[in-house]
Image (cartoon, grey):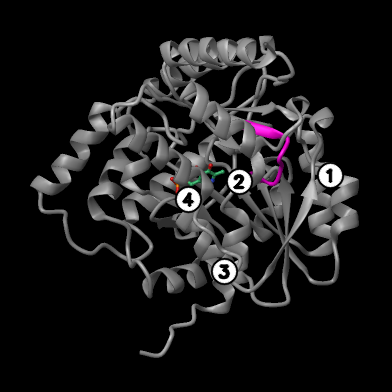
Amino acid sequence: MKTVVLAGRLRHVEASPTLALAAKAKALAKAGKPVLDFTAGEPDVPTPEPIKQAGIAAITANRTKYTPVAGTPELRAAVASTINRQLGTNYAASQALICCGAKHALFNIFQALCEPGDEVLLFSPYWVSYPPLVRLTGAKPVIVETRERDGFLPDPSVVRAAITDATKALVLNSPGNPTGAVIDEARLKAIAQIARERGLIVITDEIYDQLVYPPARHVSIVQVEPSLTDQTVLIGGVSKTYSMTGWRIGWALAPDAWIEAMTNVQSHSTSNPASISQDAALAALTGDQRPVADMRRAFEQRRNRLVEGLNRLPGVRCAPPDGAFYAWCNVKALGQPAAATAEQWLDEAMVVTVPGEGFGSSDYVRFSFATSLETIDAGLKRLDAWFRKRKT
Ligand SMILES: Cc1ncc(COP(=O)(O)O)c(C=O)c1O
């Protein structure tokens, strides 16, 4: 048989490193190893009961057939009204596209808007999937660095300097994965002004919007600059807020013409997201919101415990993140790339973390605190022992 040559655009697209490590941790745990897993990209609590019941009710009522490609009218309306209530925006239901997770919403929008020759600005450290999502369209990701001393927040003057005639879009992610940084109103205003002047599309990934720890506050670029709504794509979903990662429901809110284009992409790939999951997501958005507040409080306590403990380790530095559920931890002082450190922690302490390389930095390791306080305490104890052994 003739050798099959993979498509050229896949040459720089590798499997997600976060998912790979999480899989390795799960495999070790299954083999009976006493692994402490800090890789989780999902809340550790179950999906709240009323949401699960809505999914079961959808099956019982035979709501198990194709829905409109863009999602059920009820869920599209609920997404628009939820975001309008939270951000004071004015989205119509027609401007909400329901996708198979926020990642799929991002895939659709990049496919709809980007092509070879385009550049897309991404802030580093970035969520691992942004560069491949851009590359899959033939466009080029352009990385704009943020610095630890600025709290990993984008510097508008650096953004301005990175723009070329080929720049088509910029991606914001607040609260951010992996840093937990929450972009403030002043910076958003400055970025909005640049986007307006240069006619850039703003893709704002707000999947962690409900996981922000006081006194920090989630602010969206469409809130501080409502006039930018006509050139912005707002991405969100139920995965993190309602602990529904496996249900695969996310969304994009955007101008009608872009939603139409994304719907076309979706119509030839996945069609509608699962009908059962859509009913469950509707129950999540319209039901009791107390489980969200409970989860936020629990995560805040875990964040404090983890960050305090990490900062007690020699050569490790970590500022408390304002949002999401990740601690982005500086391990540069250990004198080796983060990947080597993470590997040693896995092999010698059975503590599994995600090294920063996949996020664009070899000086940091990401710890997820979407895990129990017991795991956090035990992990810190093992790392403390690892550092003591290392010194001797
Ligand atoms: C920044 C960011 N955006 C999007 C996603 C994808 O979310 P979903 O499960 O809805 O596809 C994740 C998941 O880890 C994320 O961290």
Residue mark closest to the camera, 1 vs 4: 4
The amino acid beneath tag 3 is: Leu
Q: Is mark 4 within 8 Å of ligand 1?
A: yes
Query: Mark 2 or mark 4: which is in front?
Result: 2
Residue name at image x 46 percent, y 15 percent: 298
- Residue at screen point 68% across, 32% down: 181
Between the residue at mark 3 and the residue at mark 1, the CA separation in whole angstroms equals 30 Å
Q: Kindly identify which numbered label has been placed on residue 136.
A: 3
Q: Which residue is mark 1?
A: 190
Q: Looking at the image, do the residues carrying marks 4 and 3 touch, with CB atoms under 8 Å apart?
A: no
Secondary structure state at the residue bearing disc 3: loop
230 or 266: which is nearer to us? 266
Query: Is there a contact, CB below 8 Å, between mark 1 and mark 2?
Result: no
**Marks 1, 2: nearer the viewer:** 2
Residue 332 at x, y = what percent? 76, 30
Q: Is residue 233 magenta?
A: no
Q: Which residues are magenta?
A: 359-365
Label 3: how many residues lie within 10 Å, few (<14), some (14-19) or many (20+)? many
Residue indicated by mark 2:
127
Q: Is residue 233 visible?
A: no
Determine which residue is flagged by label 4.
Answer: 102
Above or below 35: residue 189 = below
User: Label 4 to label 3, Cα distance in Å?
Assistant: 17 Å
Q: Residue at x 43, y 83 (%)?
A: 4
User: CA separation, marks 1 and 2?
Assistant: 22 Å
Q: Nearer the viewer, residue 356 or 123?
A: 356
